[in-house]
Amino acid sequence: MPELKIEVIPEGTVIDHIPAGKWPKVVEILRLTKPNGGTLLIASNVPSKKLGRKDIVKVEGRYLSEEEVNKIALIAPNATVNIVKDYKIVEKFKVEIPDEIVGILTCPNPNCVSNHEHVLPKFHVESREPLKLRCHYCERTVEGDEILGNL
Amino acid sequence: MPELKIEVIPEGTVIDHIPAGKWPKVVEILRLTKPNGGTLLIASNVPSKKLGRKDIVKVEGRYLSEEEVNKIALIAPNATVNIVKDYKIVEKFKVEIPDEIVGILTCPNPNCVSNHEHVLPKFHVESREPLKLRCHYCERTVEGDEILGNL
């Protein structure tokens, strides 16, 4: 069969160790459904020593903002981000969930002040595994799919 | 950089020659955002001799129904479908837009009888390039993004 040759991307970002099946969330966070001119490679449910199965997303010609990395951390807390330039990895880091999550997740409580006033939403991390966050303003806790749904 | 090794899928379907950027529609038609237990590989905007740039989708352990192939034909009229079994291509065919499209596209005319009675929607192909369809019941023509939006 004609093998799908996955070219090494000349420059861009490789997000590795995404939990299996979570690639659509990464695509959504990075808005990758619209082509950016470069190649996009997605491999889902591939064997992984660390995770059993994992997803990988490679995006040519694209680098991530801190906000994008923090969003990815919320859905893929063990993800690794590789920055590629001139065919080489020039930087590699694990995503990290910051102790305070400011401005990237909206509070699911419709009465929370952060949904009504000009206030950036802010959450404190109560637990990392499983991930559980508490709204700084209304103290509502958010976990699981509710986190994904409010990113 | 660590190369993303794209394993040859042991069995399943390879959809090749999808127009660049249209992979999200193929994923939607085949409902590939939920893992099926096998590996999923998506390559978008890769160089192609025929198309300049193209998308490829490989799905392990999955075969397509006639309805799925016909839906793909509407968004990727030059796509090739390769059926893989035991690491070999056992069948290869080009998708084809049938002369009549029955039951896979709903009519965008809200007053069309096919949206109200127990009648399968039916369209006749008026033109293939660009694709233009005419509703059998209300004679409304459908083309472009309207086709994608009503699949």
Image (tube, coloured by chain):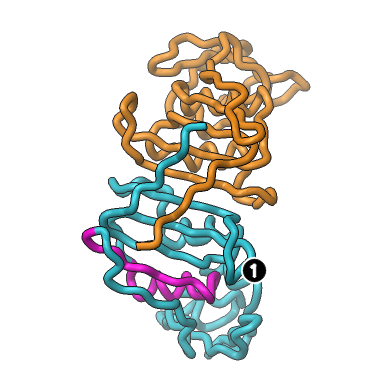
Chain colours: A orange, B cyan
> Does the magenta run of residues contain A151?
no
Q: Position of residue A89 (x, y in %)?
A: 58, 27
Name the residue tied to disc 1: B145
Q: Nearer the viewer, residue B24 or B118?
A: B24
Q: Residue furthest right?
A: A118
Residue B75 part of the magenta segment: yes
Q: Position of residue B53 (x, y in %)?
A: 62, 61
The subunit letter for the residue under badge 1 reads: B
**In the displayed structure, would residue B79 be above or below residue B130?**
above
Residue with the most extreme left position: B86
Identified by mark 1, the residue type is Asp
Residue B19, how many percent across, how many down? 58, 65
Q: Is B20 on the left or on the right of A131, as rendered? A: right
Question: For the magenta stretch, what is the residue range?
Answer: B64-86
Q: Nearer the viewer, residue A26 or B10?
A: B10
Q: Compared with residue A150, is residue B75 higher up or lower down, i.e. above or below?
A: below
- Does residue A77 appear in the picture of this structure? yes
Position above or below: A132 against A116: above
Q: Secondary structure at mark 1?
A: helix
In which quarter of the view is residue A136 placed? top right
Q: In this image, A147 relative to A103: left or right?
A: left
At 42% from the left and 50% from the top, the residue drawn is: B41
